[in-house]
Amino acid sequence: MKRGFLAWTAALIAGLVHAEPYPAKPVRFLIPFPPGGPTDIVGRLAAERLSRSWNVQVVADNRPGQGGNIGTEQCARAPADGYTMCMISIAQSISPAIYPKLGFDPVRDFAHVTLLATLPSLLVVHASLSAQSLRELINLAKARPGALNYASGGSGTSSHLLMEMLNQQAGIDTVHVIYKGTGPAIVDQLSGRIEVAFSTAIAVLPYVQSGKLRALAVSTRERLPTLPDVPTIAESGLPNFDGGSWQGVVMPAGTPREYVNAVNAELVKIVRAPDMKERIAGMGGIPLGNTPEEFAAYMKTEEEKWAKVVKAAKVGTP
């Protein structure tokens, strides 16, 4: 009788613990890139809104390095208890094709929560560069092979592969300069140390609008609503060019589904709120929000797509 009572009490306590409101304590929100870049901008907006909605602190924690792979691996290895989540980007769908000993699998090692936004990239040059169009930039690069430098936020990131794709399709030779994230790369481009870069519109739109950087073309097949006069690369003479970045949220694989669903529901509500949609669109992004299943399928498709680009561009580890 006593043993049965103890078992009933333990089951009751377990049920009460399981029924505890989520989240019941601060949540760690890993951002695997340095401050100032698009992943940091979108991630901090999401963390701020989650904190406000849940009335629980969601701590944005920047862990940059190796094109976002260091912080992403930390997320994959974190306890699957619902109290660690992570921003993930296009860079992590590219990494398996670049790094043979990658410390995580972007499909297998995460519970995919939602795709927050897609981020068209702009091909931007320093205002002092003479090129006023993509065609003029290509002519300049052909006249001075190896003389123009381009920045990326890390080997294997979208800023890297988009430029390699441009080099290949345009038949030009530019020099890759690697930074630990988009933020530091933009700083050097603003100073004139770097002439060319593909950067997400969300990161460079203010500098384009102020005239410090010049946008020559948009990387996707559609023009950017906030810069309607800037043509796409496909319109500018390279009809097969199409590529863009994106940002999403994942949790460690094995995180209880009810927690994944709770985070998904809150983030979708946040990203679709009129003020947030306006905020993201105003920075050059396209707000989305989808189901965990849709995001997982999207991640698999992106990994397959970029593996083909990496192979064609003969991109290797730095």
Image (cartoon, rainbow, N blue to C red):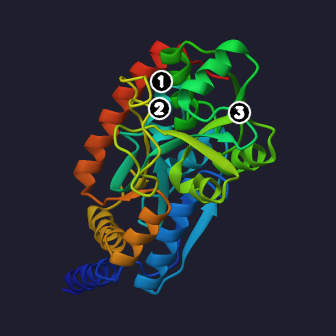
The C terminus, quarter of image = top right
Compared to 317, does 279 lie above or below? below
* In front of the other: 82 or 277: 277
- Where residue 69 sits, quadrant-wise, is top right
Q: Which mark is residue 187?
A: none
The residue type indicated by label 1 comes to Ala
The residue type indicated by label 3 comes to Ser
Q: Secondary structure at mark 1?
A: helix
From this viewpoint, is residue 280 visible?
yes
* In front of the other: 166 or 95: 166
The residue sitting at 27% across, 55% down in the picture is 292
Compared to 5, does 93 lie above or below? above
Q: Which mark is residue 97?
A: 1
**Real-space CA distance between mark 3 and mark 2, rounded to the nearest whole angstrom:** 33 Å
Q: Residues within 10 Å of mark 3 (few under 14, many from 20)?
A: few
The residue type indicated by label 2 comes to Ile
**Residue 304 placed where, x, y %?**
34, 27
| Whether label 3 touches label 2, CB < 8 Å | no
Q: Earlier in the sequence, mark 3 or mark 2?
A: 2
**Real-space CA distance between mark 1 and mark 3, rounded to the nearest whole angstrom:** 36 Å
**Residue 108 placed where, x, y %?**
36, 39
The residue sitting at 67% across, 54% down in the picture is 211
**Real-space CA distance between mark 1 and mark 2, rounded to the nearest whole angstrom:** 6 Å
Residue placed under numbered mark 3 in the picture: 130
Compared to 228, does 258 lie above or below? below
| Whether label 1 touches label 2, CB < 8 Å | yes
